[in-house]
Amino acid sequence: MSQALTAHGAAIEPAESPLTPESWGKLGMWVFLVGDAVGFGTLLAGYGAMRATSADWPNPIDVLGINLTAAMTFLLICSSVTMVKALEWLSKGDRSKAKMFLALTALGGAIFVGLQAYEWTHLIQRGLHIDGNPWGATLFGTTFFIITGFHGLHVSAGVLYLLWTISVVARRPDPRASYNFVEITGLYWHFVDLVWIMVFTFMYLL
Amino acid sequence: MAGAGHKHPNYMAIFWYLAVLTVFEIGVVFLPFGKFTNGVLLCALAVGKAALVAMYFMHLRFETKTLGWIAVTPLAIATLLVFVLLPDGFAVAKRTDDSKKVAPAAASKH
């Protein structure tokens, strides 16, 4: 076949290198994350368009406040650091330190979900509901609960995913053999952090 | 390609960049530059923070360029979608305004 192509003077296409040579799982996670990012992007774009064209959209800072959510943002950034530290220790072959940092990451996520539940309870008691609020446009509450709820679901799923990752790391005989697996978990966790950076800016600060 | 043999970036430095940028973000909210300037500054800071997370925590800096382009696509789609949705939003807002104007006029006739 190649002889025939050369005989006709056609160039032979060079061998294609895979996008993620380490594992197919990593590529699978990237495909999932890009799809999920389109979902979040659509929600935030819809939020932006509705807000821009609404005459009575409340000022988010006045209603939601930013002290608690600033602390939640800082917490997620810290949990991203503990996640990469787990990966770093795993590459050095230290399983116990890797497990400790993974557990700290899961703890950070669990605290984040707890703080979000506290924030929701507080806002609901003040009158912010999915179908109305005393401050203005109904869609203000609708978009707030849908977008922060969708993100909160991702964080909750991430905590479970991290707990499962810890159990896998604990079971594998060679800690370095879990590197790719933990890196894939990390991709998901950092994505959740990245999305929160956007949610915090568009829904609380702007 | 970030693998077990890959040299890890200075994660603590990235953490401090993110922490400082978050403090800047909160500071921008209280600046008296007006909504548009504050909005542009906040969007720039958010994109900067997101880029730091993607490039260094998600190791996109060390992956193939093609994967980087694929990862950026959702941002482009979301930005495009805002402009696609705006005309409909303005049309709905105009209809709502018109109906508000018509309602009091009709009430005064009766």
Image: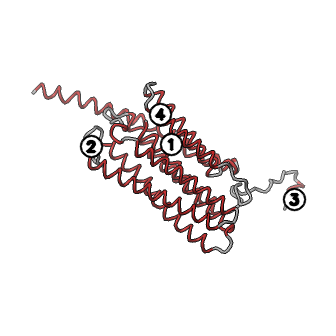
Q: Give the structural element (helix, strand or loop) at label 2.
A: loop
* Mark 1 surroundings within 10 Å by alpha-carbon count, few (fewer than 14), some (14 through 19), many (20 or more): many
Q: Quadrant of the C terminus of chain B?
A: top left
Rendering colour mode: secondary structure
Q: Residue at x 49, y 62 (%)?
A: A159
- Which amino acid does the dot numbered 1 rest on? Ala
Tell me which chain the residue with mark 1 is part of: B
Examine the rendered structure and indicate whether residue B12 appears above or below residue B37.
below
- The answer for how far apart the CA atoms under marks 3 and 1 are is 48 Å
Q: Which amino acid type is shown beneath numbered disc 3?
A: Ala
Tag 2 and tag 3, C-beta contact below 8 Å: no
Question: What is the three-letter code of the residue carrying label 4?
Answer: Gly
Q: Tell me which residue sits at (44%, 54%) in the image.
A: A112
Image-quadrant location for residue A132: top left
Indicate the position of residue A111 as horizontal and vertical percent values: 44, 57
Residue type at tag 2: Asn
What label does residue A4 carry, if any?
3
Q: Nearer the viewer, mark 2 or mark 3?
A: 2
Give the residue at mark 1.
B78
- Mark 1 to mark 4: distance in Å? 26 Å
Q: Residue A174 placed where, x, y %?
A: 68, 72
Give the labeled residue for mark 2.
A133
